[in-house]
């Protein structure tokens, strides 16, 4: 594994030097790398300040909490009841169904509760500061339908352990990132199954801490794949009828969308898409129009079972006495391997948000002046079935 790592590292270093040292584009690329590195430094400094502030606040909270527990605190019954109500909100989905009575620090609970929540409720209230004794008169039901007071409601995730919550705090992400990086480093230096497993697990933990996205959404395994959403607004100085007609003819998409090679329509509401992905990959799928209000709304989505699930909706608004059109555009797609696929695409230079900005500027120029900036000719050539690129990479269905 060490020899393989050295070989991969050498190849990567050589490719990087060739990329940055290119006589024609090397200067621009080096400037771009410098700007990104400077931005990364600023982002790291800001993240460090957030983590430090979170750690300080947690340390102070833990200190004062411990201090209060060590000394006997005289608390009135009204304060204890308020603390209990606050605690119930974190572990009970039907707080209105529980009646709390406090007399000289002694607590009595009446009402109804779900069986799955009952142990957590008793444990949490028993640890509330000022509670001297707890009497449990709750009626326990297995199903919500067994009692009208148990209908509806949902448990807030506040009582879940830190590392089981959907969003980690800055301190938790920092600790997990250190642990994941350490595990990854240890795995890289080891051979065999143990090394590979440790490196893989360390990579997942590190990515989880960096992105703050649940692993099942990050990897797309065992849960819903993460949708990458793009929301843009643009004003085109043309009547709404002309702008809507241009979008409605989806064959026009390759003229301004740099990653779209071809869109073929079949019937009134169905189309076939061919899109160029990172590293020369090509994806194809069918889409249908889901909503159509002439000169107002146009929406579409991919059919079930598509490799890359995607959808989009555009709202058209006429203003300036009908001489201009404001577009509100929302698009989303789901990479085949969740957010990891999106991250991989960005490493290869395919940033959907940056692409969308460039595409919309070409669209604006194309409608307003009748011609797009330099890249329209490339899109037209790419969309032509006779080009050599049409016979390029094998499409992924």
Image (spheres, rainbow, N blue to C red):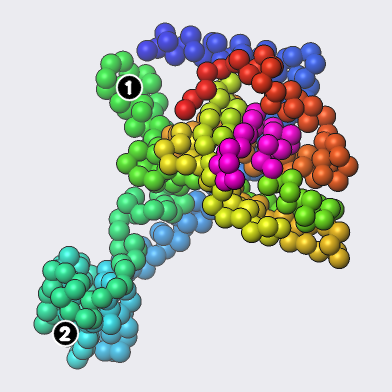
Q: Nearer the viewer, residue 124 or 241?
A: 241
Q: Are marks 2 and 1 in contact (CB under 8 Å)?
A: no
Q: Please tell me whether residue 270 belongs to the stretch shown in magenta.
A: yes
Query: Mark 2: which secondary structure?
Result: strand
Quickly name the residue at label 1: 196
**Dot label at residue 110:** 2
The N terminus, quarter of image: top left
**Dot label at residue 227:** none
Q: Quadrant of residue 345?
A: top right
- Range shown magenta: 249-271
- Judge left or right: residue 377 versus residue 201: right
The residue depicted at 51 percent of the width and 42 percent of the height is: 302
Q: Few, some or many C-alpha atoms within 10 Å of disc 2 (few <14, some 14-19, many ≥20)? A: some
Q: Nearer the viewer, residue 33 or 51?
A: 33
> Residue 132 at x, y = what percent?
17, 80
The residue depicted at 37 percent of the width and 32 percent of the height is: 202
- Judge left or right: residue 254 versus residue 156: right
> Residue 179 at x, y = what percent?
37, 37
Q: Earlier in the sequence, mark 2 or mark 1?
A: 2
Q: Nearer the viewer, residue 180 or 277?
A: 277
Q: Quadrant of residue 17?
A: top right
Query: Mark 1: which secondary structure?
Result: helix
Residue 288 seen by the camera? yes
Image vertical order of residue 324 relative to residue 132, above or below: above
Q: Few, some or many C-alpha atoms within 10 Å of disc 1 (few <14, some 14-19, many ≥20)? A: some
Q: Quadrant of residue 390?
A: top right
The residue depicted at 62 percent of the width and 33 percent of the height is: 264
The residue depicted at 72 percent of the width and 55 percent of the height is: 327
Q: Please tell me whether residue 91 belongs to the stretch shown in magenta.
A: no
> Residue 45 at x, y = what percent?
60, 45
């Amino acid at each position: 594994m060490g020899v393989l790592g050295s070989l991969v590292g050498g190849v990567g270093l050589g490719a990087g030097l060739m990329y940055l040292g290119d006589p024609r584009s090397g200067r621009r690329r080096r400037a771009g790398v410098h700007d990104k590195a400077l931005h990364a430094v600023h982002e790291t400094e800001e993240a460090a300040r957030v983590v430090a502030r979170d750690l300080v606040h947690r340390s102070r909270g833990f200190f004062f909490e411990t201090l209060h527990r060590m000394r006997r605190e005289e608390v009135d019954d009204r304060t204890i009841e308020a603390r209990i109500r606050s605690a119930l909100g974190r572990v009970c989905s039907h707080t209105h169904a529980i009646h709390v009575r406090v007399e000289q620090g002694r607590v009595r609970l009446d009402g109804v509760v779900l069986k799955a929540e009952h142990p957590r409720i008793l444990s949490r209230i028993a640890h509330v500061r000022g509670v001297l004794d707890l009497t449990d008169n709750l009626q326990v039901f297995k199903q919500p339908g067994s009692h009208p007071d148990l209908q509806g409601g949902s448990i807030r995730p506040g009582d879940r352990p830190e590392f089981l919550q959907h969003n980690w705090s800055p301190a938790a992400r920092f600790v997990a990132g250190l642990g994941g990086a350490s595990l990854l480093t240890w795995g890289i230096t080891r051979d065999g199954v143990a090394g590979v497993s440790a490196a893989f697990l360390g990579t997942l933990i590190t990515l989880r801490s960096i992105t703050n996205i649940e692993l099942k959404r990050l990897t797309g395994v065992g849960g819903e794949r993460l949708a990458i959403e793009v929301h843009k607004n643009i004003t085109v100085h043309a009547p709404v009828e002309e702008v809507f007609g241009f979008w409605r003819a989806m064959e026009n998409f390759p003229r301004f969308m740099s990653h779209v090679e071809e869109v073929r329509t079949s019937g009134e509401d169905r189309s076939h898409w061919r899109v160029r992905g990172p590293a020369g990959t090509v994806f194809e799928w069918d889409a249908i129009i889901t909503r159509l209000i002439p000169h107002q709304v146009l929406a579409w989505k991919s059919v079930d079972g598509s490799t890359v699930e995607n959808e989009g909706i555009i709202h058209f608004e006429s203003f300036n006495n009908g001489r201009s059109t404001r577009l509100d555009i929302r698009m989303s797609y789901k990479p085949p391997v969740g957010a990891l696929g999106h991250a991989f695409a960005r490493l290869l230079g395919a940033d959907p948000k940056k692409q969308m900005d460039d595409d919309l500027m070409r669209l604006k120029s194309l409608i307003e002046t009748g011609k797009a900036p330099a890249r329209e000719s490339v899109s037209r050539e790419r969309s032509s079935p006779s080009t050599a690129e049409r016979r390029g990479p094998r499409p992924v269905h």
